[in-house]
Image: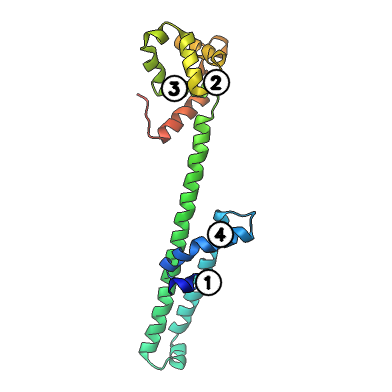
Amino acid sequence: MVNSELDSIVETSSCTLEEYKYVYPRLMADFVKQWPDFDEITFLEREKHLHFLLIEAYERGRLRISDFEYRRKFFNSEEDFFNSMSYFEKRIASHKKIRSYLDSKIEDIEKVDVIETFTDECFASNAVQKIIYLNELGIIDLLRKEHCFATSVNNLAKLISTITDEKPTTIQPYLNALLNQTEAHNKNPYGSISTVEKVKMQLANLGFNAE
């Protein structure tokens, strides 16, 4: 089909994969406009089911014309039969490709959702997690090489406060406990094994491995 024809179609039972890719944005936009409470994932799942049904229908058609009595009754020649069989096989192949395309779009959307969720968890975490992140990344040790931070935890807390958007008075007790290797007043960030493991797992998922 030419693009002018594709611009007006509302069903895709005869589309090739490339034709479907062309009409997809319009069909999806029309669906969301008609059903504003639903999203693209809903449309994709609906389309996958539709093309599954089309595959089943074409499979039944191919099976029906394969019957010897049906062939003898409705086909005048072997060429007619093979042309019809080829049509069904092409339609089945096209709809399988379209379903694979829809699967890939769902996967892409879900990856984005995972990344956004992961980012929220990583960078909107509480003060304890933020300090563990900085420590596991070696940033606290790196800063402590500077004289102004090596000699003043208060200065270090002020800088980390600027980086993390936490109050210096919140940061400093955790730094004191961390740098003095104590669990005084339960302020050592590493006092919660589950929090530490969560941070390390998130960093590992990013490809970072602390030595």
Mark 3: amino acid: Leu
Within the image, what quadrant is residue 81 found in?
Answer: bottom left
Categorize mark 2 by other alpha carbons within 10 Å: few (<14), some (14-19), many (20+). some
| Mark number displayed over residue 8 | 1
3D distance between C-alphas at marks 1 and 4: 14 Å
Which residue lies under the disc numbered 4? 29
First along the sequence among labels 4 and 2 = 4
Categorize mark 4 by other alpha carbons within 10 Å: few (<14), some (14-19), many (20+). some
- Label 2–label 1 contact, CB within 8 A: no
First along the sequence among labels 2 and 1 = 1
Which residue lies under the disc numbered 2? 166
First along the sequence among labels 1 and 4 = 1
Closer to us: 91 or 72: 91
Residue at image x 53%, y 16%?
A: 171
Closer to us: 209 or 12: 12
Categorize mark 3 by other alpha carbons within 10 Å: few (<14), some (14-19), many (20+). some
Mark 1: amino acid: Ser
3D distance between C-alphas at marks 2 and 1: 56 Å
Which residue lies under the disc numbered 3? 134
Mark 4: amino acid: Ala
First along the sequence among labels 3 and 4 = 4
